[in-house]
Structure formats: C-alpha cells, structure tokens
Image (cartoon, rainbow, N blue to C red):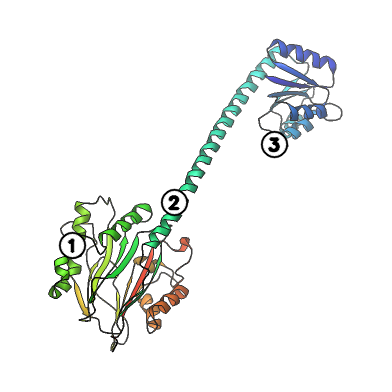
Amino acid sequence: MNILVVDDARDMQLILRRTLTLMGHQVVLADNGKIAWKLIQQQHFQLVISDWLMPIMDGPTLCRKVRSANLPHYVYIILLTGMSGKQNLIQGMEAGADDFATKPIVREELEVRLRAAQRVLELERNLEDKNRHLEQANQSLSAAQRLIQGDLERAAILQTGVLPNQKQFGRIKLDWFFQPAQYIGGDTFNYFPINEDLFFFYSIDVSGHGIASALLSMCLQTLLSATSELHCPEELTSPHDVALIPARLATRLNQHLHEQLDTGDHYLTLILGVIDIKQEQLHFVQAGHPQPFLYTPGNEGLVQVACTGFPIGLLQEVEYDAISVPFPSGSRFILYSDGLLELPSPKGGILTEAALMDCLQTVNSQPAAEVIGQLRSKLGLEQSAALRPDDISLLIMDLAAAEP
C-alpha cells in the first residue's frame, strides 16, 4: 500500500518507515497535519497513520479534513495516541478515524491493523467498482430511455396523424377530441364516405395501454379502411343490404382477430356503423362500447341509446346485430370511450354517464366544434396524465339539412 506517516517526532517517523517498508509498503513522511493534507490532495494514499497530538494541525483535525473532502477514493486512517479513555476514543471516531494504535507501536499489532485496513480498502474498492458499473448501466439505461421516449413522441405524432382531418362531407358535419393516457393509446376512430349516399364510421377502444394497444389500434385502422377486404363490396352496391353492413363487418372483424392476429390478452370495444344520408337512417353495431347519445329533432333533448354487445376478440363464435334508428336532418350522434367516464366530475367524484349527458344537454344546441370546446373547459379533457387514467376519444356527427 501507499502509506502516509504523519508525526512531529522524527524518531517515530523513521521507526514507522522502516517497519512499514520491511512489510512491503511505500511510505511518505509528513511532520504535521497541514503538510499531510497538502500531500493527500496531490497523491493517492490508501492509508494514513497519524499521531494525535501535533503542532499546526493535529490528527483529529486532519481526519475531519479528509472526511469532508470529496476525494476520488477512500482513505483509511489510523490514529496513534498515548491517551486512553472512552471519551478520547469517541472523539477520534467522530473525527473520522477508522482505527487506533497506542504508542509505543508494536510490529505484530501494526501488522494486524494493516490487514484489517486492507480488507476494508478492498471492500471499498469493490464497492467503487460496482458503483462505477452501476453508473455506467444507469447512463446506458438513461440513453435508452431517452431514445424510447423520443420514439414514443414521434409515434404519438404518427398515431394522431392517421386520425381524420376533414370534418365535413356534404351534409355530414363532424368534430372530435382525442387524448391518450400515455404518449400513445389504444383508442382510435375514423370515418369516410362509402359513396354519395352512405357514410361509414367507427370508434374503437383497445384494452390496456401503451405500445401493444396502440399497435393493435393502428392495425385496426388498416383493417377498417375503405380498401379493406373485410368490407363487403356486393353489399355496398345493394341498397336493401345497407342495414346489414355493420353487423357483418363486426362479425368478420371478430373472426379475423381470432384467425389472423395474435392479440394476446387484448380485446376491443367498438361502435361501428353507416349513415344512410338518402334514407336518413342510422345503422350501427355496439360491441361492449359505452352506450352512445342520440339527438333527433322533435325530441326534448339527447337520449342514451340502450344497446349491448359482446366485445370484439374475446370469443370466436359471436354474431352481432345492427341497430337501426331514424336520423333525419338536424340529428346528432355522439360516441365516446370509457376513459371519459374516469375523469373527475365537476361536482366531485367520478363522471357518470348521467352527468356526462347533463353536460352535453347544456351545449347540445351548439355546433360540434363548440361542444368539444365547452367540454374541454367543463370536464378538463386535457388535464395531466396523472388525473387521466385512460385514453379519451369523443366523436360527434351531425346531419345537416339538404340544400334546396
């Protein structure tokens, strides 16, 4: 070991240097604590053997200097003293000494104390190595986390980018709100005209959160696109089969998830349907999704459409039935995911379907964009993720009057 001997007595310095050198150690001498402190700052000493009583700077003061310094390695300190008593021992330990030796020093005793010091220093060295490796691992993990976070942020932009931008298709006027619980989520929706008379739409909530749910929701965007093989071209050309489109498409989607996709434990709820603009009819399937709200002229306000259906992807042999309701000019259809019902209510507690309908009733006479804006304020749709335990999606569809 590289050892620093600190003692104001020259004879003690020489005795210790000779003894330690014969043991195979490198020894540097210092006359007092002040000189020793300068040497400690300049060189790497594993061990310091210091006299207690010295001029200029004594042993306990040197101990405190070493312990308060941010040295890159541990320094083991043995104090030499001719004093006895428990109070002196406590004072030395509080100053930062590791061990004590009494004067006059005995070689065998010194050898034992040096072996103890070597064990402690070896443990300290191993701990420093482990801490260094742990710091390197943490740096690697932090870099990986930054990379993943950047990828998730870009994925969130891409996920939002696949949502529809256009909000008017002839007589159909729409608006929507989307906010994932995390960077990306399992909620998705889409709408597009099938032809001049038929308008297709869906709202989906994939179970769970995070990457797997988001990937499945993106896959569903492709499966339910206008060019998907799941759609029924022969049915789209026959006006008598329009009401059958949602039920058959939901059945085919359920079969596809079981036969073609390994969705693991994931399933999905949805509302999928068609607006027959010419006949002013709404045909849709509900598969475990929250019951939608419907407004038609002549009614006093919104009503919640009573409907039930089995979620997609849980059981293979499931048949779905379509619900058909009148949808005349001035009608409104509102779809939402259950994440909206996990928000805090303006009156306290969790938002209920009844409370949500009350909020919607107060603004139902306004255009869809104004309704979304009012809900942002009243329900805090964009509040922090800590208060938003699930993805939120909301889709409002209106049928305007035909132009004369």
Quarter of the image for the C terminus: give it. Answer: bottom left
**Along the line of sight, the residue nearer the viewer: 259 or 229:** 229
At x 84%, y 26%, the residue is 54
* Numbered badge on residue 70: 3
- The disc, 2 or 1, on the residue closer to the chain's N-terminal end is 2
Residue lying furthest top in this view? 22
For the residues labelled 2 and 3, the Cα–Cα distance comes to 39 Å
Q: Is residue 173 left or right of residue 133?
A: left
Q: Which residue is mark 1?
A: 251
- Splitting the image into 4 quarters, where does residue 325 fall? bottom left
Up the image or down, 156 lies above or below 90; here it is below
Q: Quadrant of the N terminus?
A: top right
Q: Residue at x 51, y 38 (%)?
A: 137
Judging by the rendered image, the residue that carries numbered circle 2 is: 151
Residue 119 numbered tag: none
Which mark's residue is nearer the viewer, 2 or 1? 2
